[in-house]
Amino acid sequence: MNYRIFRAINQLVGRYPLLDNMMITISQKVRYLYAFLFILMWFRNNVYKKITLYAGISAGITLFINGFIRRFYFKPRPFLKHNVRVLPPSPSKMNSSFPSKHTAIAFAVATSVLFYKRLLGCIMWLLAFWAGFSRIWMGQHYPSDIIGSALLGSLSGVVVNNTLRVWNPFIVWTIHTYNRICSLIKFR
């Protein structure tokens, strides 16, 4: 079933050059769009700074879990096991198909934002979905890899949101220190 869904999506590669280019762009550029959004949010006010830091913590936890899983579990990418259409850039053959780092981080960040800013979080979730889908389209991941990575990232965002009392001292200190440094720079 996993391979059949993958095949149904991946067989469209090459038939629609515009979609191929769109999927490559989404796969490669969503992270930069997220970074741009977080830069804008950081310079807005302290509420947005908190959201940015929560999302950063969620992304960090997701990266840690991703690395841990990859250390003990290897799943070959689709193009190593099957004759599939792969769009550039091709990932390393040494990288496991599960979990998808791009997808997991995108969902972790989107979920963190969703708790505080619904519209922005929904837009980021939609972008995260398309980032994951693009990885299937490009021949780099199976649907189960993307679904599992989306769950992993979303769960990280939920865990950070449910353990705010652990993170808040760090968040408050970081924002206070940043604001203090900015005020010192202004008075010189």
Image (tube, rainbow, N blue to C red):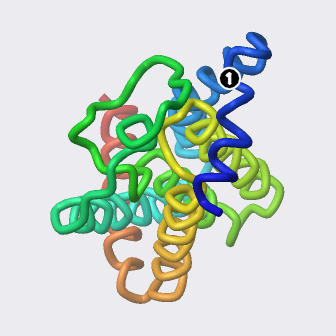
Residue at the (43%, 65%) spot, across then down: 58
Residue 113 seen in render: yes
Residue at the (21%, 40%) spot, across then down: 94
Quarter assignment of residue 115? bottom right
- 81 and 150: which is toward the camera: 81
Q: Quadrant of the N terminus?
A: bottom right
- 109 versus 81 height, above or below: below
Residue at the (79%, 63%) spot, across then down: 118
Residue found at the very far right of the displayed protein: 119
User: Residue 13: image x %, image y %?
Assistant: 68, 23
Q: Which residue is mark 1?
A: 13
Q: Is residue 178 left or right of residue 85?
A: left
Q: Is residue 141 left or right of residue 173?
A: right
Residue at the (65%, 42%) spot, across then down: 7
- 105 versus 184 height, above or below: below
Quarter assignment of residue 63? bottom left
User: Residue 66: image x %, image y %?
Assistant: 32, 61
Dot 1: within a 10 Å radius of its alpha carbon, few (fewer than 14), some, or many (20 or more) residues?
some
Q: Kindly state the secondary structure of the residue where label 1 is placed.
A: loop
Q: Quadrant of the C terminus?
A: top left
| Dot 1 amino acid type | Val
- 121 and 23: which is toward the camera: 23
